[in-house]
Amino acid sequence: MRLLELPTNFRPGGIQRHVLDLTAHLRAKGHQVTLAGDGGAWAQVGHDPDHLHLGLDDVAELGGALPRRLAHLPLRVWQLRRVLKSRRIELIHAHETAPTLVADLARRGLGIPLVMTFHGCAPEREASVAAMARRTDLVISPSRAGIEALVRHGMPATKGRVLGLGIATTVAPPPDEALALRRQILAGRNGPLILSLSRLQVQKGIDVMVEVAARVQARHPGVVFAVAGGGPQEVQVRAWAEAAGVAGAMRFLGPISTVPLHLAAADLFLLTSRWENLPISIVEAFRAGLPVVATDCGGVRELVDDAVGSLCRVEDAAGIARAIDRLIEDPALRQAKGAVARAKFAEARFDPGAVHGQFEAAYRDLLNRKG
């Protein structure tokens, strides 16, 4: 198959990791896969002959005001249409709504099927995403909750399909390296170390996390909350931590490329998101055997329960803090929940070979139905 994988950009994140892992699987199976999208630290420009730079940030939210984004749309559509023709693309898989819009316009009259993966959005955007989904041939979501949200807003249920997240197993990081990193992050504190893999943006609720840190620090003065990720609130989050009196208990690490090592250095994984679909970061925490405290949004409840940690109400800083306190104060409970989390990672829905094979089969089935 001649396929196009189209995220908005290649900045470090769960969507981009998924796209690159899926692409590697498809190429290993002999398919021709073109990657296209805006730049970023994970862009393959100059390294991958089948990667094309396409400025989709200009038409996404990052592009600014709507009139400016719409002004860029015709050029991006024309550029993509040239790619579709020159590379004889047979199927487009778009990730997020901006790529889906550009792809749908670019494929007009070419008979190319369009697949969209719904990776989650703010609740107030679900109706517009469902409208976009209706223009595609197939909508994939890693969670049942994601499909159900779009169906509530008018997407035909027959158009949706739930496919899991393939997360590769990794060799356990050397214990001495994990311990050295732990000491570096704790910087003289005695812990515990609570890690969050979160972009610094409204979605991830870092303002809520700061309040949680203040509550937990009052009972456990040695605690450290480490947040790995960059984003638009980079300056703001530090000001929040300073104002809340927890600047000494919070570490904003920026983007990292050593996720398994950071998870191995931590005691607990935390996600304070306002909305999600099915976060890859939680599955990565399971792989590391960490208990997880997370907010009950999107498909998170399809991952987190009392057996592996705690599921808390969105923006409930007091409830999140209580859940963390319980795990800090009961190391045996923390260890037991971590063991269940590690066992859950072995489920087939996280196996890359099985999951990516399902994507491959879905593509082939769609092409067969299109004739």
Image (cartoon, helix red, strand yellow):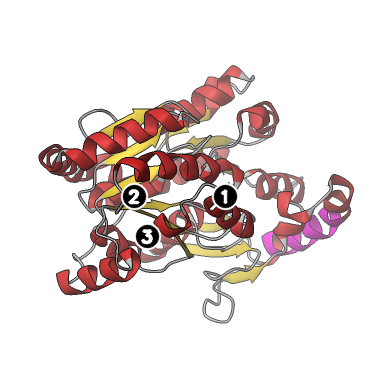
Residue 342 part of the magenta-drawn span: no
Q: Is residue 130 visible?
A: no
Q: Is residue 184 above or below residue 138?
A: below
The amino acid beneath tag 3 is His
What is the magenta range? 72-84
Residue 117, disc: none
Residue neighbourhood size for the residue with mark 3, other residues' Cα within 10 Å, grouped as few (<14), some (14–19), many (≥20)? some
In front of the other: 149 or 94: 149
Mark closest to the chain's N terminus, 1 or 2: 2
**Label 3 – label 2 distance at C-alpha:** 10 Å
The amino acid beneath tag 1 is Ala
Instruction: Find numbered disc 3 in the image and state the secondary structure of the residue it sits on.
Output: helix
Instruction: Find numbered disc 2 in the image and state the secondary structure of the residue it sits on.
Output: loop
Of the residues tagged 1 and 3, which is closer to the observer? 1
Q: What residue is rendered at 48% in x and 57% in y?
A: 247
The part of the image, by quadrant, that contains residue 53 is bottom right
In front of the other: 174 or 19: 174
Q: Which residue is mark 3?
A: 25
In front of the other: 358 or 272: 272
**Label 1 – label 3 distance at C-alpha:** 47 Å
Mark closest to the chain's N terminus, 3 or 2: 3
Q: Which residue is mark 2?
A: 166
Residue 74 part of the magenta-drawn span: yes
Q: Is residue 288 above or below residue 332?
A: below
Q: What residue is rendered at 71% in x and 58% in y?
A: 57
| Residue 322 locus on image (x, y percent) | 32, 31
Q: What residue is rendered at 49% in x and 59% in y?
A: 229
Q: Are marks 3 and 2 in contact (CB under 8 Å)?
A: yes
